[in-house]
Amino acid sequence: MKDLTPFCCNHDDRPPGEAVRLIVVHAISLPPDDFGGPGVEQLFTNTLDPDAHPYYATIHHLRVSAHYFIRRDGEIICFVDPGRRAWHAGVSCWNGRERCNDFSIGIELEGSDTMPFEPVQYERLAALVAELKRRYPIEAVVGHSDIAPGRKTDPGPFFDWNRLHALLAQRDDIRADAHPDVKF
């Protein structure tokens, strides 16, 4: 796992006594629908050059992050220690609780709403969820669209929740319920 936590400052302390209970799956590509470049790393480390691509001029001012980013080749990059609050969910609500950043871990998959994700991304995501489940009292895995409906669409219609469910169910230490949310 590539560790970029020293270079990402878009995070802060979780509220006192707040346990991590939720994993939020996102999709991102920078520029949109372009994979393998440095754009996501640059966005999360506040080094995105607004002149490098026309789209970057519209987002370079954002101060956002996720705990993890899973590239299409399966590489996992950690931007924020999972014990800290990353800035990934924005205005959000899950089971009546607002401010999902307070109690969630954000995992970005390199992808978009317009195409399927890679098999290795599901495998790495399932392994990461299993590890996080061992460390935290995780209750569910949801999409960004589930906690910010009408505002967000990721991970999108090509994300295969049944595939993630099956991979999690194969693990002896994980119990998963059905789509759309994976609950423990």
Image (cartoon, rainbow, N blue to C red):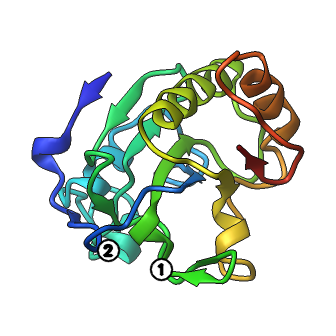
Q: Residue at x 56, y 22 (%)?
A: 127
Image position, residue 28 (x, y; %): 54, 51
Where is mark 1, residue-wise? 99
x and y, in percent, of residue 51 in the image: 26, 63
Q: Residue at x 27, y 76 (%)?
A: 61
Q: Secondary structure at mark 2?
A: loop
Viewer-proximal residue, 96 or 121? Answer: 96
Write the residue at 64% across / 20% down. 123
Could you say where residue 135 lies in the image, as x and y percent from the top left?
Answer: 41, 35
What residue type is disc 1 on? Answer: Arg
Residue type, numbered disc 2: Leu
Q: Residue furthest left?
A: 6
Residue that carries the numbered disc 2 in the rendered image: 62
Is 142 situated above or below 171? below
**Horizontal placement of 142 versus 60: left or right?**
right
Contact flag, marks 1 and 2 (Cβ < 8 Å): no
Q: Is residue 68 above or below residue 131?
A: below
**Would you say residue 127 is visible in this rendering?**
yes
On the picture, is 148 further left or further right than 76? right
Q: Quadrant of residue 136?
A: top left
Q: Residue 45 versus residue 148: which sits nearer the camera? A: 148
